[in-house]
Amino acid sequence: MNFFIKHCNLDQEKTDCIIVGIFELCKLSISADYLDKCSDGYITNLIKLGDITGKIGDTLMLYNIPKVFSPRILLVGCGKKDDISRSCFKKILKSTTNVLKKTSIKNIIYSFTELNIKIYNNNIYWIIRSIVLSLKEFSYKFLKINSTTKKSINLDLITLNFFKKNDLFVGKIALKHALAIDKGITSAKNISNLPPNICNPFYLSCQAQKLAQRYKNNVLVEVVDIKQMKSLKMNAYVAVGDGAKNKPFMSIIKYSSNNVANNKVIALVGKGLTFDSGGISIKPALNMHEMKYDMCGAAAVYGTLIMASELQLPLTIIGILAGCENMPGGNSFRPGDVLTTMSGQTVEVLNTDAEGRLVLSDVLTYLERFSPNIVIDIATLTGACVTALGESVSGLFTNNEDLAFELNKASQETDDKIWRLPLFPEYQKELRSTIADFTNVGKGKAGAITAACFLENFTKKYNWAHLDIAGTAWKSNKNEGATGRPVELLCQFLLNQSNYIYS
Ligand code: BES
Ligand code: MN
Ligand code: ZN
């Protein structure tokens, strides 16, 4: 699938299909109107027959329009003219791909850049990004291990048409960003979708090391194995890995650039449980296989660093993949154990299935050596977060208002939804232990919050945010697979940190 940006005379272009919008009450978009005039009112006459109204989701394929060189024009309903939200735009794109899937069309021209999408200052930039990323999302196919694969889109060449030549510059930036973000999202999905007998902590560390080879000028990778973890006193991390034959590996991906927009160090930490059986507090069998996705946080960090490297962002970023496997066995840690974390604080284990926070607590302490200004951890941390926010919204927790603002901004820009939950001191009390500094599970029902409060105890030295992606990182049942979230959100956060100017 190749993308091009161009200023076209739509009637003169020879492509398989030109895609243009029409609005409610049969109002034509600028592109549709142009083609209508070229064909002496052919489109208006057809619309009069009443086969398309312009409602979102409506489509009508037209063939062999007089005086238009391309054989097909796809009219797509875009709803109310000046009232297109980002999610409406996604629906519009979805309905076009549904039509394209059923055809043999290979080359298309999208002429959508004149649409007005609400909330964005720089419309062209965001339209291009959305078109590219949506098409990539709809056409994503995981290389399945069985041989039958469902038909996806056949698209080869996608031209994005511009009306004003002046917009080409910003269009090119948008395309460059979109392709880099897609690389990040697709890499995150691919690694997340692998089975746990292939993608284990060692495999994750190998993938990290490959980044250092691929992006020699910007990326250095260091892998910390169990021996080093022990000498660092990362006892909580080590304890979680004790029951598994696949030993833990922590990968540190150091990204830097010659020109930097600021002197901040941004750290991204991903929970990388390549399988979470629950350990001695074993999970029920139903859906246990989905716990191969318990490394989606690490996959998101990996994908985000790919995007940063592709664009050579002017930033300093530390990405950590906290690879580990949680298994029951004779060497497993147990409920009742007391662990001394790297920070010196002690934890009474009440449930070995609350393992993510144990692994992360030591990583959050380990990170202090990089003197980060901002630390964001990304974790499929709690089922309780899914109960609280469902499957389309990730949980946000933070000890810093600016960081809350910046993450919410990036979330709104990308439609990768998050919602902030509180870290009030009342919740911290639920982690009181009789024999240690804290327990690893909270007493009450607010499980997503008490998990975040647990992490907060290890984040005093920097501005910190935690994203609980338990509900959003993958889909179950017939649409099963990783979503690649929240890679786009993290990429946008980094782009904003680089002071990118879009025009
Ligand atoms: N990885 C799970 C959280 C999870 C569960 C994510 C289901 C997505 C779907 C995590 O390690 C876990 O097991 N958390 C426990 C915590 C509990 C024991 C306090 C949970 O949420 O049940
Ligand atoms: Mn667990
Ligand atoms: Zn887990």
Image (cartoon, rainbow, N blue to C red):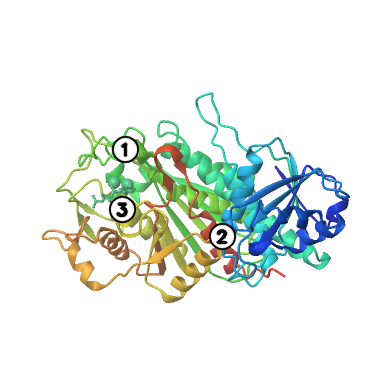
Front residue (pair 259, 302): 302
Q: In x, y percent, where is residue 435? A: 12, 58
Q: Amino acid at mark 3?
A: Thr
Nearer to us: label 2 or label 1:
2
Provide the secondary structure element on which disc 1 rests: loop
Q: Amino acid at mark 1?
A: Asn
Of mark 2 and mark 3, the one earlier in the sequence is: 2
Q: Amino acid at mark 2?
A: Cys
Q: Cβ(mark 3) to ligand 1 < 8 Å?
A: yes
* Residue 310 appears in the figure: no
Residue where numbered disc 2 is placed: 88
Front residue (pair 312, 77): 77
Q: Cβ(mark 1) to ligand 1 < 8 Å?
A: no
Dot 2 crowding, Cα within 10 Å, few <14, some 14–19, many 20+: some
Of mark 2 and mark 1, the one earlier in the sequence is: 2
Provide the secondary structure element on which disc 2 rests: helix
Q: Quadrant of the C terminus?
A: bottom right
Of mark 1 and mark 3, the one earlier in the sequence is: 1
In screen coordinates, is 192 left or right of 311? left
Q: Are marks 2 and 1 in contact (CB under 8 Å)?
A: no
Provide the secondary structure element on which disc 3 rests: loop
Residue drawn at x 72%, y 64% as measured from the top left? 114
Residue where numbered disc 3 is placed: 382
In screen coordinates, is 78 left or right of 196? right
* Residue 404 circle label: none
Number of numbered labels in the structure image: 3
* Residue 287 circle label: 1
Residue drawn at x 20%, y 42% as measured from the top left? 281
* Residue 431 appears in the figure: yes
